[in-house]
Each structure stands twice: as structure tokens, then as C-alpha cells.
Amino acid sequence: MRGLKGKNALITGTSSGIGQAIAIRLAQEGCNIAINYRKSPEGAEDTEEKRSM
């Protein structure tokens, strides 16, 4: 994924599943991400921790 460094993305449903996977991958590629969740603050925290791996 070229050209994502410095880009911004808002990803919904990031506490699990495909939303979490997308958020992590975009962050690893240098994209600034804003995460959103509805039910699981713990899952959102997990996503935040995994994004920098």
C-alpha cells in the first residue's frame, strides 16, 4: 500500500474483526487513524496497542 504515510482514515468497528485488521494494517503502513467502537472499549484499546507492532 503505497502513499499512505501521513494520510488520515476513520475506521468504524475497530474493536474486532475486519475493522480491527484494517485499522492495524493502515497504521502499520503509516496512515494516521481514528478508531471508533460501539460496544467494547477493551477491544478498542487492544486495537490501539496492536497498531504499533
Image: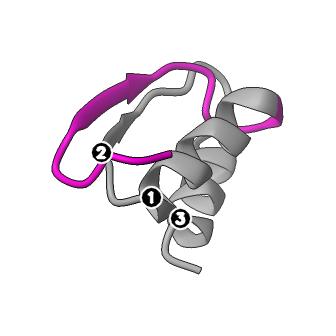
What segment is highlighted magenta in the picture? 1-17
Which mark identifies residue 51?
Answer: 3
Instruction: Tell me the amino acid under the disc marked 1.
Output: Glu
The residues bearing labels 2 and 3 have C-alpha atoms spaced at a distance of 18 Å
The residues bearing labels 2 and 1 have C-alpha atoms spaced at a distance of 9 Å
Residue 37 appears at what percent x and percent y?
55, 26
N-terminal of the two: label 2 or label 3?
2
Residue 25 appears at what percent x and percent y?
59, 51
- Assign the C terminus to one quadrant of the image: bottom right
Q: Secondary structure at mark 1?
A: loop
N-terminal of the two: label 2 or label 1?
2
Instruction: Tell me the amino acid under the disc marked 2.
Output: Gly
N-terminal of the two: label 3 or label 1?
1
Residue at the spot of label 1: 29
User: In this image, 40 relative to 37: left or right?
Assistant: right
Instruction: Tell me the amino acid under the disc marked 3.
Output: Arg
User: In this image, 26 relative to 46: left or right?
Assistant: left
Above or below, 4 relative to 53: above
Above or below, 5 relative to 36: below
Query: Does 10 appear in magenta?
Result: yes
> In the orientation shown, which residue stands out farthest toward the bottom?
53
Nearest the viewer among 10 and 43 is 10
Q: Name which quarter of the figure residue 39 lies in.
A: top right
Q: Residue at x 58, y 43 (%)?
A: 41
Q: Residue at x 45, y 27 (%)?
A: 36
Nearest the viewer among 15 and 7 is 7
Q: Secondary structure at mark 3?
A: loop
Dot in front, 2 or 3? 2
Kindly check if marks 3 and 1 are in contact, taking CB atoms under 8 A apart as contact: no
Which colour style is shown? one colour
